[in-house]
Each structure stands twice: as structure tokens, then as C-alpha cells.
Image: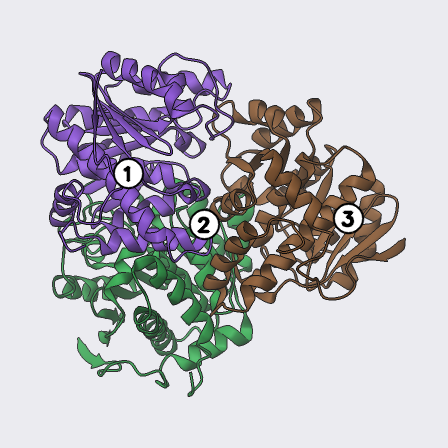
Chain colours: A green, B brown, C purple
Amino acid sequence: MHPVTFAPRRMRHDSPDCGPALRRIRADAPFVYGLTNYVAAALSANVLLAVGAAPAIGAAPGWPVAFGAQAGGLWVNAAGLINATEHDMLAAIDAANAAEVPWVLDPVAMGAGVAEYDDIIRRLAACRPAVIRGNASEIMALAGGAATARGVETTASITQAVPLGVALARRSGAIVAISGPEDHVLSPDGQQIIIPGGHRWLTAVTGAGCALGGLIAAGLAVTPADPHERLTTVAAVHALYARAAEMAAGPAQGPASFATGFVDALAQLQGRADD
Amino acid sequence: MHPVTFAPRRMRHDSPDCGPALRRIRADAPFVYGLTNYVAAALSANVLLAVGAAPAIGAAPGWPVAFGAQAGGLWVNAAGLINATEHDMLAAIDAANAAEVPWVLDPVAMGAGVAEYDDIIRRLAACRPAVIRGNASEIMALAGGAATARGVETTASITQAVPLGVALARRSGAIVAISGPEDHVLSPDGQQIIIPGGHRWLTAVTGAGCALGGLIAAGLAVTPADPHERLTTVAAVHALYARAAEMAAGPAQGPASFATGFVDALAQLQGRADD
Amino acid sequence: MHPVTFAPRRMRHDSPDCGPALRRIRADAPFVYGLTNYVAAALSANVLLAVGAAPAIGAAPGWPVAFGAQAGGLWVNAAGLINATEHDMLAAIDAANAAEVPWVLDPVAMGAGVAEYDDIIRRLAACRPAVIRGNASEIMALAGGAATARGVETTASITQAVPLGVALARRSGAIVAISGPEDHVLSPDGQQIIIPGGHRWLTAVTGAGCALGGLIAAGLAVTPADPHERLTTVAAVHALYARAAEMAAGPAQGPASFATGFVDALAQLQGRADD
């Protein structure tokens, strides 16, 4: 493990780090397909629309196979099992893999003590996701550690989760991204990028973590299939999220006006030096 | 085809055109039933509540048959197939038709290359909708033209879609409404009404088009079953949407505050000269 | 019936009544599990997050049995039948009852003339909910009175509903809470608490009533299983809702900015004297 601090100081609005990925998303307007839960679906779509991507969500008849292959990126949110089946998810994932479309796994609520549900996530995780993103408890559970989730919330700290996340990245070949007070992005070859910033209100907006999975898929859709490029993009998307959260936090009166300001900020950011 | 320009100049707030329909909705508070997708459901309900209608959404056991018949208007959004079945939709449509309740079809994502899904929409479209509304790609695909959709987004222009929309209206007997930078409302007997205005941010708010389908159903619910009256109402609802979007755009900071302002504007408008 | 007026004058911000319950929710951050509909799900989660609770929503495989038992409180919203089954709901309820987890029943749209749907709600209601909350039409229908609902809306008044609600509370052993211009909370032993205040815009925000069901479950999760304590908490949660609505109404421009301000207000309130 070779820790590399990404943007070690407070993220600045003129940071070059999130700019290239955001500019590519705006230029390419990638079609991104998501199988996610109905609690997070609208926010996820709005986050993607704000950065200029073209999202479609849900498992209408024929969509998983067709859109899994057509999309530039796919995200699969395990809590999407409240409104889709494992079969739908596997169909989309298989289509994506066959078409070399990168996909993101979000193991929501893994490790909350529901064996049947965790087993489904393990089967999804075996299908070569490009990125696995989650909170500390979820990543720990998927890595084979203790089950510490309480519903969809983490009770573990980033510090506890990072070593297990490093092992999960190495074993699975996926980039592993852990959200928390600081976000950690871990590569299969042992790199670690830390993204500071963001705002605690992100945890008070339902679906904010889930929407990040969609945004990562949009980033992958406009990034060459190169491990280093993908790692840079995943970190850049986290930095973009943190930056938008900081922009929104100032004028916000609470988590709901924060959520509004957050999506507005994502739409305002252009990835240019004068953002 | 006899083009008639509706509100050929920028929509004015004292326009008499959207007033009567809006006043009737507020006065009658019609019960409007929708089978739509979970991404758009909350916005659709809030749009309808803002103008004083009484929406119910979803296919709980017994609802399609009962509410299809009880409602003043029904809207069926094809992307609702992510959370309901074709059977649910046909049950609601049959009940509506039997009770002479007008219904609106929104062929979301038709023409995106999913044959199984498009076939379902064709079967729904064969059930005598009063109005078919969609974006350019969707209307073109349903009219038998090329498949140009990318997920739920259009890649075609209004100009390409209008001739096919005219043919679809003539063949189906439905009013056909195409959303775009300008909206076009087409009647079975060849009339064409163009509604300018609106705002590009409407395309950055997930479900804004879907919610328009619900609002059209509310308009039909308070309009006599006369072709000319219905055409006027469908155009008026589009003008109302455009007017609210223009009101919201000024103070908005981005698409999320725009969405908030848009629903607020719909609630503020009373259909009176001093709106 | 022994009417007791709770906060008989306009709710004041320093009211001691909603403070203790809110402070306990913030201190304990209870895990609250909900089976609710996709129209109301995001608002419900955001309302719960705003007061510091930890919600999970939906019937992913294994969740009803596991989360029904693990949660501090459960809410079951009958309109959740648009995206879950009666079997899911009964599984969660049985698990909750076995673990002595209190649960809230919200009989959305009961009495709208859908016999099959109403029958399901009757079966749920037979499973010993701690609280039944709804609007006037819903409570009247569940109590065996006339069917007066129109979709999810009430057409009956609180005055009509209270006598039937009193009987329902006595017969079922549940606390019965009726939302309206004033809210009435009724105990099995005949107490009646009236909570004034709130704001009419709450009825223009889709899912606001549904979210209240979740907040009641959060309140129960931090309250001893004592009839008097629970009654006090249910009234306190209604007072909290009314207080947040009043805070939001002043600066709001319409129902959407009201909804934003309402969630922000719930996050701002701390249950202290200087709130």
C-alpha cells in the first residue's frame, strides 16, 4: 500500500483534478444506465443531468440487456433489490461486461445481518465490477470483515475499513471507494488516494451516496479503460462531489436546501479554472 | 396540415390561453390517476397538487380497475413498466375507456432499440388514448419512423418529428403533443399549435416531461369530450408549463432551485389576468 | 371520551411538549424501518434523517424479517402495496411484534372504493399496530364507517372522523391519530389530544402525511412501552410537525420551497427551549 494524498489541502475551486473528468462528461454527455432503488432514483438522475450526462433508470422489460450494452457506464445499487430482481441486475451486468461497458457496484446495507441479501451482493461482486463504492461498514462486510451496518448506515470508521478495502481491491481487481468524512479511493495495485472535504449534510440527504455511484459510472463512461486513468477519474468524481458539497453548504439552511444547492452546484461547475 | 400559431410571441403572463383550463382545474380539483415510474412519481404528484388536482399514483391491488374508472383523467407513462406490469396498465386503460375517462399515453424511451419494450407501447397505443405526448424521438418511433432515442433522451429534432406526429395523430385519432425547444400540439384533423417559451432547464429536471403527462390528464378531466375543446386544453397545459418555467428560470441558480421554483410557480398561477 | 387540549393555543417555539421526544430521537438515532410507497419514500427518509434517525426503506430480499426485528420502530404505509406485497408487510409486522418493536399503520386511500385493497388493510390492522395514523376518510373507513376517500384524499372532516376514531382506538388498542386542519390523537382509554397549527401547504406536498408515519415510528422507538408515554410521544411528534410547518410557511413561495423549508426546520429544531 502506497498512500498518495490527493488534494491534500482543502479542495480549491480551481483544482485541476476534477476538471478534466467533468469536462469530458459535459462534452460527451454519456448515456448512463442505473439499477437503483426508488428512494435514491430521482436524486441520482438529477445529479447526472446536472453534469450533462444522460441517465436512464430501472428494469423495464428488455432494458437491462439492451441498456446494459448500449450505455457508456452502468451502476448497480444493491438496494435496487427493493424494486428489481437479482436476475435483472445480472442481465444488465452480463450485457455490460460483454460490451466492455464498465460498471459500478454499490453494496448498500451489506453487513446489516441479512444473510440472503448479502449473498446476492456477493454474487454481483463476483461479476468483475470496475468500481465498488460504499460506506465503511459495507466495504468491510463485502471484504469479508465483520458485519457492522445498521440498515443502510455505517457504524464503522474509515480507519477500520481501509485495510479491508485495500484487500478487497487487490482480490477483486476493482477500484474500491469508501465514503466518509474523508473519502478513500483504493486501487488493485495498492495505491490510496484520499479526498478530503465534502460536508456532513451529505449524510442527511437520502440517496446522496447512491447518486455518487451513478456519477462514477458517468466518469468511467468517458475514461479510457486504463487502470491509472480510471483511478484518476474515480478520485476526480469524489473531488467533484466534495467541491459541490462545499459550495452548497455555505448558503444552506439545512439538509434540504443543501441538497438543492448541491445539484445546482454540480450544474454550475464546468471543470474550468474559473469555476 | 394547417399550421396555427398559438401565442406566436413570447408567452405573456396575462395570456388568456392557459387561464381557463387552469381555473377549471382549480375549481374542480379533479381526481387524476397515474401509472408512472418511480423516478418521476413524486414530481408528478407535486405538479398536480400545485394546480389543485388530486393525484393518486401506482398499481396497488385493485387500484388500476377502480381508479381507472373513478378518475377524471388517467395518464400512463411507459417507463412505469419499471414498477408495474403491462397487465396493470391495460386494466387501468380498459376501465378508463369503459367509463369514458380520457387518458394520456407517454411513450417514454420508445425507439431506444428495445423491441420487447416498444411492442408493449404499441399495444398500449392501440387502446385509443386521447393524447399521446412525448419527445421527438419517442413520437417518431411510435409513428413508425426511425428509432433514434438514446435511453429516455431524444436525439431527433422537433422538425424531424412533426411530419410523423401529424401522421400519428391522423391515424390514431389522438392529439399528439411533442415537447422540445418549442412544443407542437397536433390534432387528428391536421391542426398544428406551436407553444414557444419554456426553459432548457426543464430537460435537466428528471421527470419534468413525465409530470406534463399528468397535467394534461388533469386538463382533460375538466374539459368536455369535444375535439376542439380538448385540443385547446392540451395546448393550454403546455402554455402553462412554459409560463411556469419562465417564472422559475429568473431567480434559479441551477436545475434544482429551478425545479422548486417551477412547482411554486404552478401553485402561484391562478389563471387570472393579474397572475 | 375525555377531551384534553394539548397546546390549546398556537404552538410556541419554546413549547416543552415536543422537546423531550425530539431530544431523545437526536440522542438515540434510532434505526427505523419503513415499507412505504415510492412516491413518499424519499421525503420520508429525508424527514427522518433531519431529526437524526436512521431510516431504511423497502422490501429487499430478507429485509422485512430482519429489519422488522432489528429496528426500533416500523412503519407500514398501505400505499406501499404499489411496490411491495402484503406478504412482505406481514413478514415485517410479525417480526416486529415478535421482537416487541412498535409499529405504525398508515391506511392510505382506505375507503376509496377498492374492496380488495381495503381488505388487505383490515388484515394488517388486525396485527396490533401501536399507532394508526391517517386522514379523516381513512380512519373512518378503517373504523367501519362510510367510504369517503377519493384516491388518497379525504372528503370527510375531522369532526366526522373523531367519534369513529375514538371507537377504533378503543376496539383495536392502538393510538389513533387523525391529520387535518387540527390533528387529533386518540387513546384506547378515551383520551383526546388536539394539536393545532401546521399549515395547509402540508397537503400540497406529496408524501407529507406518509412521512409523518415514519416520524411517529421514530418517536415510538425512543419511548418506553407505556400507554401514557406513547400517547405523549405521538402527540409530541404531531406538534413537531406542526411547528416545522409553521417555521417553513413564512419564507416559502409555494409548496415546493415550503417542503424544502420544512425539512430544514426539522433539522434546525433541537428540542431545546431556545429553538
Residue at x 72%, y 66% (from the top left corner): B10
Residue B147 % position (x, y) = 70, 55
Real-space Cα distance between discs 3 and 2?
Answer: 38 Å
Kind of element beneath mark 2: helix
Which residue occupies the foreground of this view, C186 or A75? C186
Check chain identity for marks 1 and 2: say if they share one: yes
Callout 2 crowding tier (Cα within 10 Å): few <14, some 14–19, many ≥20: many
Kind of element beneath mark 3: loop
Real-space Cα distance between discs 1 and 3?
Answer: 46 Å
Callout 1 crowding tier (Cα within 10 Å): few <14, some 14–19, many ≥20: many
Horizontally, residue B90 falls left or right of residue C273, namely right
Residue B17 % position (x, y) = 73, 52
Residue, disc 1:
C214
Check chain identity for marks 1 and 3: say if they share one: no
Task: Kindly indicate whether the residue at mark 3 contacts the one at mark 1 (C-beta within 8 angstroms).
Answer: no
Task: Kindly indicate whether the residue at mark 2 contacts the one at mark 1 (C-beta within 8 angstroms).
Answer: no
Tag of residue B143 = 3
Horizontally, residue A70 falls left or right of residue C132, namely right
Q: Chain of mark 3?
A: B
Q: Quadrant of the C terminus of chain B?
A: bottom right
Kindly identify the amino acid type of the residue bearing the numbered disc 1. Answer: Gly
Kindly identify the amino acid type of the residue bearing the numbered disc 3. Answer: Ala
Residue A215, placed above or below residue C94: below
- Residue C128, quarter of picture: top left
Residue, disc 2:
C255
